[in-house]
Image (tube, coloured by chain):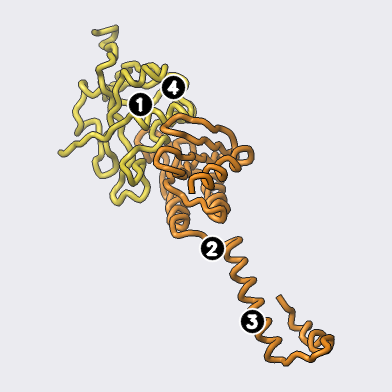
Chain colours: A orange, B yellow
């Protein structure tokens, strides 16, 4: 992106002087490109992920005993970490399949790789997380996001 | 078979009922779009010594469901629970004779399997 105070130096430093219109055009496209890049990096997420984020945000309205079996209401920490992850994973092409509150203040975020293969990620109140990948309900990958996320991405890419 | 204090032995052919969160509208629910049930329905809460269920033949759907505007009933066979190396125990409560527990090492993987075995009860009041 070109700063305003760079305009004069651009005009005077070139052997073939550039018109002010061209400089403004360059600035416009530069700004537009930067904006799009930032949206992709920080704010642009798929509709599925946006719906999942909205749904997770609504979990805050649950009260203790929401399941009639004394489940605890989801914690703000779990909610925030789940949303942060969904945004980041969306950039890798992962779209949320399902999400639900856990019974211990945690949040479940589920991704479906194929109808038989799915990944469950749990965001716990104590800031820990768990990532499990299942094939027909049999777990074949278990760990944390830090340790196993690449396996999820690899599986996702293999089946796309 | 009565064990003691009016507790009965849970046999393989018995079925167990559990309420699954399904409010109206179902924006937050245990049910996925394909009708399957999510693992957290069978997640053990910290401090619990088992997953609460009702023995199907000792209750009625309209009693077990408590509030049909918030929950659906799901059923799971005791034999299939035993096959996961989990135990079932009839643990009557003063206000619920059918109350029972699924006990054992119920981790994330077992919760997933229990959810996979559960079926929605087609119940109409």
Using the rendered view, name the quadrant where residue A129 is placed. Answer: top right
Q: Nearer the viewer, mark 3 or mark 4?
A: 3
- Discs 2 and 4 lie in a common subunit: no
Q: Position of residue B120 (x, y in %)?
A: 26, 35
- Disc ID at residue B99: none
Instruction: Characterize the local packing of mark 4: few (<14), some (14-19) or many (20 or more) Cα atoms within 10 angstroms.
Output: some
Q: CA distance from mark 2 to mark 3?
A: 21 Å
- Is residue B7 something one can see in this rendering? no
Q: Nearer the viewer, mark 2 or mark 4?
A: 2
Q: Nearer the viewer, residue A38 or A63?
A: A38
Q: Is residue A61 rendered to the left or right of residue A21?
A: left
Q: Is residue B97 depicted above or below A133 in this figure? A: above
Q: CA distance from mark 3 to mark 4?
A: 64 Å
Chain identifier of the residue bearing label 4 in the image: B
Residue shown at 58% from the left, 66% from the top: A39
Instruction: Characterize the local packing of mark 3: few (<14), some (14-19) or many (20 or more) Cα atoms within 10 angstroms.
Output: some
Q: CA distance from mark 3 to mark 1?
A: 62 Å
Chain identifier of the residue bearing label 3 in the image: A
- Is residue B103 something one can see in this rendering? yes
């Amino acid at each position: 992106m070109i700063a305003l105070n760079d305009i004069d130096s651009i005009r005077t430093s070139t052997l073939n002087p550039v018109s002010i219109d061209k400089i403004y055009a360059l600035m416009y496209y530069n700004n537009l490109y930067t904006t799009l890049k930032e949206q992709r990096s920080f704010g642009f997420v798929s509709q599925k992920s946006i719906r999942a984020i909205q749904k997770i945000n609504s979990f805050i309205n649950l009260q203790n005993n929401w399941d009639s079996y004394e489940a605890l209401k989801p914690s703000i920490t779990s909610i925030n970490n789940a949303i942060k992850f969904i945004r980041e994973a969306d950039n890798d092409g992962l779209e949320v399949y399902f999400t639900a509150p856990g019974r211990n203040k945690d949040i479940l975020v589920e991704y479906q790789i194929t109808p038989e293969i799915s990944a469950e990620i749990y965001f716990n109140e104590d800031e820990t997380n768990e990532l499990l990948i299942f094939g027909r309900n049999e777990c074949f990958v278990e760990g944390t996001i830090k340790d196993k996320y690449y396996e999820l991405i690899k599986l996702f890419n293999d089946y796309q | 078979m009565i064990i003691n204090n009016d507790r009965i032995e849970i046999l393989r052919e018995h079925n167990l009922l559990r309420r699954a969160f399904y409010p109206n509208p179902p924006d937050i629910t245990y049910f996925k779009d394909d009708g399957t049930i999510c693992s957290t329905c069978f997640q053990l809460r910290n401090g619990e010594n088992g997953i609460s269920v009702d023995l199907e033949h000792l209750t009625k759907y309209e009693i077990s469901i408590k509030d049909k505007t918030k929950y659906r009933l799901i059923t799971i066979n005791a034999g299939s629970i035993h096959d996961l190396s989990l135990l079932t125990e009839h643990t009557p409560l003063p206000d619920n004779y059918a109350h029972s527990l699924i006990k054992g090492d119920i981790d994330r993987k077992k919760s997933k399997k229990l959810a996979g075995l559960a079926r929605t009860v087609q119940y109409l009041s």
